[in-house]
Amino acid sequence: MPQPQPDGAESAISAPTRTAIAVGSIAVLVVLFVVLASGGEDNSTPTGASGSAEFKVEAADGAPVGGVQELSVDQGTSVVITVKSNSDQEVHLHGYDIMVDLTAGKSERIEFTADIDGVFELELEDTAAQLASLRVNP
Ligand SMILES: [Cu+2]
């Protein structure tokens, strides 16, 4: 003989589980928002179908022109960052540990495959002034 279901038992999902799902959904929305918001401006070239991305970063008087650039690519992308400064500088991409000597007014290319995920600083080595933040999404 079938037992009558107690009130509320028809819900297959418990209250704590519903809360967890709600929190998870909010987290997903926040991440989506951040991703979309960061894609809006200037230099955040999305990774193309070709799997390559190019950025330009310029320094003047030891500071980034237009503020610290937020660069974002997917892991595995072939990246070219063209850097230029109005003074002689040494530029350092942390994480990938790439150093490039800049001659005043002359562009140099930093080329690498973004095979390490994380967030890495591009800085002027002498003054530790940050030029860009490179995010490599796994
Ligand atoms: Cu450094």
Image (spheres, rainbow, N blue to C red):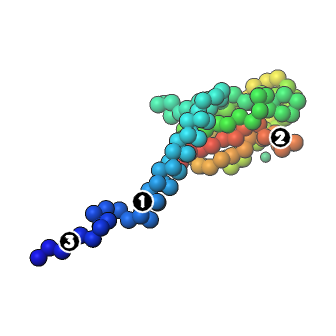
From this viewpoint, is residue 41 visible?
A: yes
Residue at 60% of width from left, 29% of height from top? 40
Q: Secondary structure at mark 1?
A: helix
Residue at 53% of width from left, 48% of height from top? 138
Q: Position of residue 105 (x, y in %)?
A: 82, 23
Is label 2 or label 3 in front?
3
Q: CA distance from mark 3 to mark 1?
A: 24 Å
Q: CA distance from mark 2 to mark 3?
A: 70 Å
Q: State the residue lying farthest toward the left.
A: 1
Q: Which comes sooner in the sequence, label 3 or label 1?
A: 3
Q: Quadrant of the N terminus?
A: bottom left
Image quadrant assignment for residue 91 = top right
Q: Secondary structure at mark 2?
A: strand
Q: Which residue is mark 3?
A: 4
Q: Which residue is mark 1?
A: 18
Residue at 78% of width from left, 40% of height from top? 130
Q: CA distance from mark 1 to mark 2?
A: 46 Å
* Vertical side of 49 occupied by 117: above or below: below
Q: For the residues labelled 1 and 2, say whether their Cβ atoms are less than 8 Å apart.
A: no
Q: Position of residue 101 (x, y in %)?
A: 80, 35
Q: Which residue is mark 2?
A: 129
Residue at 18% of width from left, 74% of height from top? 3
Residue 72 - label: none
- What type is the residue that disc 1 sits on? Arg
Graded by Cα atoms within 10 Å as few (under 14), some (14 to 19) or many (20 or more), the crowding at tag 2 reads some
Q: For the residues labelled 2 and 3, say whether their Cβ atoms are less than 8 Å apart.
A: no
Q: Secondary structure at mark 3?
A: loop
Graded by Cα atoms within 10 Å as few (under 14), some (14 to 19) or many (20 or more), the crowding at tag 3 reads few
- What type is the residue that disc 3 sits on? Pro
